[in-house]
Every structure is written in structure tokens, then in C-alpha cells.
Amino acid sequence: MVQGTGSHVGKSVLCAALCRLLRDMGLRVAPFKAQNMALNSAVTPEGGEIGRAQAHQAEAAGVAPTTDMNPILLKPTGDRAAQVIIHGRVHAVMSAAEYHAFKKEAARFVLESYNRLASGYDIIVIEGAGSPAEINLRENDLANMGVAEMTGSPVVLTGDIDRGGVFAALAGTMELLSASERERVKGFIINKFRGDIALLKPGLDFLTNRTGVPVLGVVPYMRDLCLPDEDGVSLDSSALIKARSGVVRIAVIRLPRISNFTDFDPFKLEPDVELVFVDEAAQLDKADCVIIPGSKNTIEDLCWLKDKGFDRRLKQLRNRGVMIIGLCGGFQMLGKAVKDPHGVESGLGNANGLGLLNVETTLTKGKKTHQVEGLACLYGNSHAVAGYEIHMGETNGSEAHFSMITRKGGASADVPEGAISDDKAVWGTYIHGVFDADGFRTAFLDGLREKKGLAPALAGRPFAEAREASIAAFARQVGESLDMGKIMGIIG
């Protein structure tokens, strides 16, 4: 089990790297995260919803993702409540106190999934959540040491040196664990190191002498990897605005409850594209395209957009011919109204939309989760797209449809989806991952380039190929940086 000193220290990608390394040794390996709190999610082939990180780890392991790899997914709907998803399906919406009381019962779902995986794989790579030193959450813990004890797993603790204070974080975490928990920790990994590792050696020696736990390796900071972040912590950092300049500027509105922001990862491969996450309306002025992403609470985020003046600025940009796109919740916001008669997301009831598409959305109690394939129409041509739908709501109206779904949940289909305005300047879709399709993404960007008087770009590296190359490169670096002999000994 890989645990961390906090969120965003690299647990997810380290687990993915270990999955790949173990797979390459000829072992059958599966990822597992008992309880994940994230708004970045994915859909399994059978239509269950799991954390996006576990889907990525399954890809690294060379296996299909299943709901057993993430039996409990928590999707916050506000500061004090979350949608609780068990074995891929919505179980309930609970307050923090309600879920804390529910955890003892939820443990059986965790064990059911773990036992199923354990019966079919040689090794399970378990990812922790947050930090095991959250002493207020220790009772009935389903995130860190509670899972390690439940499954009899040894633990490797990782810290992020790029943030600073890594020695204090690792040693302090050990101090806050119980004696039996400390006994489970068999090694440390220091992640995201920049510089001369020889200068780090005195600190490594001190850490081992202080805690009695060996450092298994130091993983260097690696740039320009096409690996997905699990949560929005990365959007609060210097990565908020990409450093490189570009000739095509795409602005994504960073909603308070933004979900599935990895939808935009493919743009990072385009050398002439500048991807910017913004939270002020004035930051949209130089954008060639504005995207409203998914949201876990569409109506409350729609109200936030209006309070921040985004509604007025978007209408001005639309009149200037700037392309405006909505994905999932963002698609719902582009319409005339969003109705929540059952209080699915909040107690606000109905809200007027941005009015940029002639559609209306009614939120429903049932959640639609499907893998899909289809044909999307853009600039008069059809392009193959694929991805997944995760939404609670039906959207209807008089606009032309954006795409035609040809396969849904593995079965043939013929279902119109999304909406696009008559002048093709505003469109929305429920398909997460639509920009992963290389042909569609190229056509979309070439349209923006043409509008600016720029030549079409040469075809770049396919996104799937770049993602696979990143997994392989990071796994190779992790394998070279860690004492894999000791890790195999820890695994047993």
C-alpha cells in the first residue's frame, strides 16, 4: 500500500508506475483504492463509476478497470455533503457526519471488492488517500491504515520534496501513527526531487536514523508527462496558467466544483495551444475559445458564474465570434434553464441558464454512466469520438445535435446527443474525453487556427500513444530510482 504525507504528493502516479513495473515482470497486478474522494471520475466497461486515477492505474497494469478497484467514491456536492457511490452506483447523498457514521457498514463493501481482486490477481497495489496522520478520521478509517490493517498490507509512505518540508512531513507522520501502524511502514519514497541527490544524502540518513525506516528511493521531478492529475489541487498551483505561450488560447473556467478537468489534457500535446484555467471574467478577453467544464453541482456553479460576471462576458465574446463550449454540466449551463425538481444537487430548485443554446435541462434522480462511441459534426464534417457519459439530467431543445451516439455501453445505438448553434459557434456535449480523439481535436483546433489566419498544424503525436509513452517513461524512471529488490521483499 502506497500512502502519502498529504494530497497531491504523487501517490496516484507512483501506484500507476508500480502497476506497470509489476506487470512487466509478468505478474497479474490490479490497482485498489478503497475510498476515493474526487470529482475526476471514469466509467468502467460495465457502466460503473470509479475514480479517474484507478482507471489510469488499470491502464498501466494492462487490465480493464472494474468497480472493485475503487469500491467507494465520494463526490462532494458542497462543503459538507457528498454523493456516495458504492460499487459504481449512487448509494446516497450524505453529510460528513452521516458518512462518518456509515463507514463501519461501508467496510464490508471494501472487503468484498478486495477479496474479489485478491482471488484473481498476484499483487494488489493499494493507494491511500490524503494522509494517515488525520487523527480525527482514524475511527473506522477506510482510506489509509484502516485499509492496510483490513487487508494485512505493508505500507510505503511517500512525500513531496518539491513542496518543501518533506523530512518534517515524513517524520511527523510517523510520530502521529500508533505503534502498530508505525510497524506497518516498511519504507519511504521521496518524490518530485530536483537537483543533486548527493546533497540530499545527509537528510536521508537522518530520516532513517530518526524513524528506523529506510528510504527506498528518490524519484526525480519529471516534466511534460501526459499523466492525469487526480484532483483539483493541481489547478490551485502554478500550473493554473501554462507557462508556454501559444497562438491559440483556450480558456477553461475553473468552476468551484469543477469535475473531470482531465478532459483537457490532450491540449497539452499541442505546441501552438495555450491552455489557461481562469476564475475571473476579465481573464477571458484574449481567448479564442472558452470552455465551461463539468461540475458536481451545476446550479450552484451556474450561480457562481453569474455572480462573477461570466454570463455578461460570455455573451459579449459570443457576439464577437469566440467559440464557446460546454462539457457535461457546462453544457447544461449553456441552455435556457436548469431545473432540479427533486433536489438532486442542491436546494436551489430552478435556475435560468446562460441562454447561449436553445435547450433546457431537467436533473433526474438516476445517474447515466456509459462508455460511448459516436460521430461528432464540426465544420460540416463528421469525426469519430469516444469517451463516457456521467450525468444526472436530460437535456432537450430545438438546436441541432452535436453528435450521434453509435455505441453505448458496448451495444449498438443510434442516439442524437448534445447541441450546436446554427452558426456553429456554441456547442455542448455530455461526452467526457471528446478531445482525446485525434481527428476531432485536430479539426477543432484547425478551425480556430483558420479564424486567426493561421495555417493548419501538422499532425501531432496521437494522444493515446503519448499517454502510453508517459506511463512507460515514468515507470522506467521509478524503477531506476527505487530499490525494487527491497520493494519486492516488502511485497513478499
Image: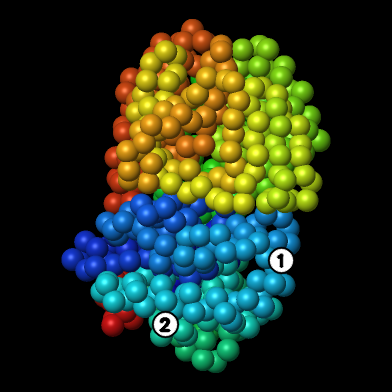
Q: Position of residue 321 (x, y in %)?
A: 61, 12
- Check disc 1 and report the residue beneath it: 95
Q: The N terminus is located in which quarter?
A: bottom left
Q: Residue 151 carries which label?
A: 2
Q: Where is residue 93 in the image (x, y as percent from the top left)?
A: 65, 62
Q: Are marks 1 and 2 in contact (CB under 8 Å)?
A: no
In the image, 137 versus 112, the foreground residue is: 112
User: What's the amino acid at mark 1?
Assistant: Ser
Q: How crowded is mark 2: few (under 14 residues within 10 Å), some or many (20 or more)?
A: some
Q: How is the image coloured?
A: rainbow
Q: Position of residue 187 (x, y in %)?
A: 42, 78
Q: Dot 1: what SS?
A: strand
What residue is shown at x 37% (from left), y 70% (from top)? Answer: 125
Q: Distance between the residues labelled 1 and 2?
A: 27 Å
Q: Can residue 49 be seen in this view?
A: yes
Disc nearest the viewer among 1 and 2: 1
Could you tell whether 103 is left or right of 183 in the image? Answer: right
Q: Where is residue 205 in the image (x, y as percent from the top left)?
A: 46, 78
User: What's the amino acid at mark 2?
Assistant: Thr
